[in-house]
Amino acid sequence: MESWRAPEVPSLPVPGPEVRLHDTRTREVVPTRPEGPARLYVCGITPYDATHLGHAATYLAFDLLNRAWRNAGHEVHYVQNVTDVDDPLLERAEATGVDWRELAEQQTELFREDMVALRVLPPENYIGAVEAIPLVVDLVQRMEKAGAVYRLEDDLYHAVDADPAFGEVSGWSREEMLEVYPERGGDPDRAGKRDPLDAVVWRGRREGEPSWDSPLGPGRPGWHVECAAIALEHLGMDFDVQGGGSDLVFPHHEMSAGEGQLAHPGSRFAKVYTHAGMVGYDGEKMSKSRGNLVFVSRLREAGTDPMAIRLALLRHHYRDDWEWTDAELDDAVATLTRWRSAFSAPAGAPAGPVTEEVLGALADDLDAPRALAAIDAWAAASAASADSADSSDALDPAAPALVADLADAALGLRV
Ligand code: 5CA
Ligand code: ZN
């Protein structure tokens, strides 16, 4: 499907350091060492009730990674999916009496508009589950050849016991897995399964549900295999980073990695698995099923500057779980006012040290709060020197434009 319009990104006079990133599998911050273009897959939305601030925070985290890699001199090949056919989307369409295709198209378009407003760099390949069906069929057939698929009535299951590496991505115990599985699309209690944790890779046709003819029989893709198939087609095995929110660690990323690896024995799915924390509101994780959502589009309609939304979200480290409050937005608006005045001043404090600090912070596991604090400190120092006759000589007329470009290139904040 169509991706969205790319924002302009200024080029910086100095390169950033190599990027280090937290890896869920090893539970360590590790260097990323892209060979050729850095290859990034980030799980996309299921297009109903998009885009809430939790979604936005997760996509901003990986946008920081995309920018940090580019600033370190890498090209980036970014792929994202849209889960445009799956149970929760179909259920919502049914409940609201809207055609599921129409719901998906409307919500995907709203998401694109939100991403443009937030200056998120678009993926090169933006791929819907529906358009990926031939890829899914191909991957399931490869898994079948590896002896990792069995049939239960009209459905095909990924047999997790065929995979000696099962559990490696999340590092979770079976008890932990079994506890969340039913809430996250799993069907542990279905009679006839070999292992309660086995996951559907092809769901046979049901009355009243969309389905596609295929050599696997009529049906539709399972969720995890959708992402595995799209990532493999566009990035290949052993790509650099698989990303998403922490609610995708298990089962989604565990299963999609396993499915890729079963079909391509001997290589790893992703080198690094990185997860963003959950944004809450009113005491609970912001989620479609709980309905406690704050939407980017609603804030925009109410006249909120999208850069204030972006700044407020970036005040929190991407790995933290945190709770949104409306006060965060007021704070961000005040910060933008201070920055705007410093960026339009005739001179400012030297740009060299703040550039080094901002690029260094972002390359160090995407530490946006530290990067923002460095620009705050630069703006405050510039304003203080401008007010003092003694130190105004130390101000550099080139600095405001350089730091404005830095905020844009590294943090996506065009002020
Ligand atoms: N389509 C699947 C991924 S293939 C999916 O999870 N879609 S989603 O619309 O439910 O979520 C989109 C992204 O937002 C995922 O990476 C998810 O982990 C993330 N996300 C969802 N809720 C939150 C939240 N409250 N805070 C932070 N990130 C969230
Ligand atoms: Zn996914």
Image: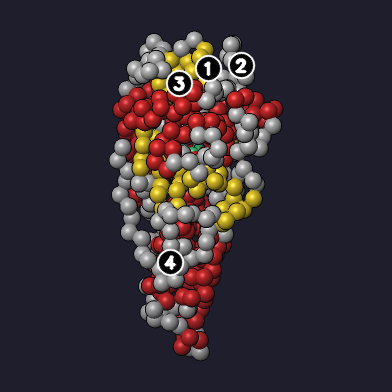
The kind of residue tagged 3 is: Trp
Q: Can you see residue 253?
A: no
Which of the two labelled residues, at mark 3 and mark 2, occupies the earlier sequence position? 2
Whether tag 3 and tag 2 are in contact, CB under 8 A, the answer is no
Q: How far apart are the alpha carbons under marks 3 and 2?
A: 16 Å
On screen, residue 127 above or below 376 = above
On screen, residue 257 above or below 18 = above
Q: Depth-wise, is mark 4 or mark 3 nearer the camera?
A: 3
Tag 4 residue: 406
Q: Position of residue 10 (x, y in %)?
A: 36, 64
Rate crowding at label 3 as few (under 14), some (14 to 19) or many (20 or more) other CA atoms within 10 Å.
Answer: many
Q: Can you see residue 183?
A: yes
Q: Quadrant of residue 114?
A: top left
Rate crowding at label 1 as few (under 14), some (14 to 19) or many (20 or more) other CA atoms within 10 Å.
Answer: some
Which of the two labelled residues, at mark 4 and mark 2, occupies the earlier sequence position? 2
Q: Depth-wise, is mark 1 or mark 3 nearer the camera?
A: 1
Tag 1 residue: 150
Horizontal side of 100 relative to 365 (left or right) equals left
Q: Position of residue 29 (x, y in %)?
A: 62, 53
Q: Residue at x 61, y 16 (%)?
A: 194
The kind of residue tagged 1 is: Tyr
Q: How far apart are the alpha carbons under marks 4 and 3?
A: 47 Å
Whether tag 1 and tag 2 are in contact, CB under 8 A, the answer is yes
Along the viewing direction, whichever of 200 and 188 lies nearer the viewer: 200
Q: How far apart are the alpha carbons under marks 4 and 1?
A: 53 Å
Horizontal side of 290 relative to 94 (left or right) equals right
Rate crowding at label 4 as few (under 14), some (14 to 19) or many (20 or more) other CA atoms within 10 Å.
Answer: many
Along the viewing direction, whichever of 52 and 85 lies nearer the viewer: 85
The kind of residue tagged 2 is: Arg
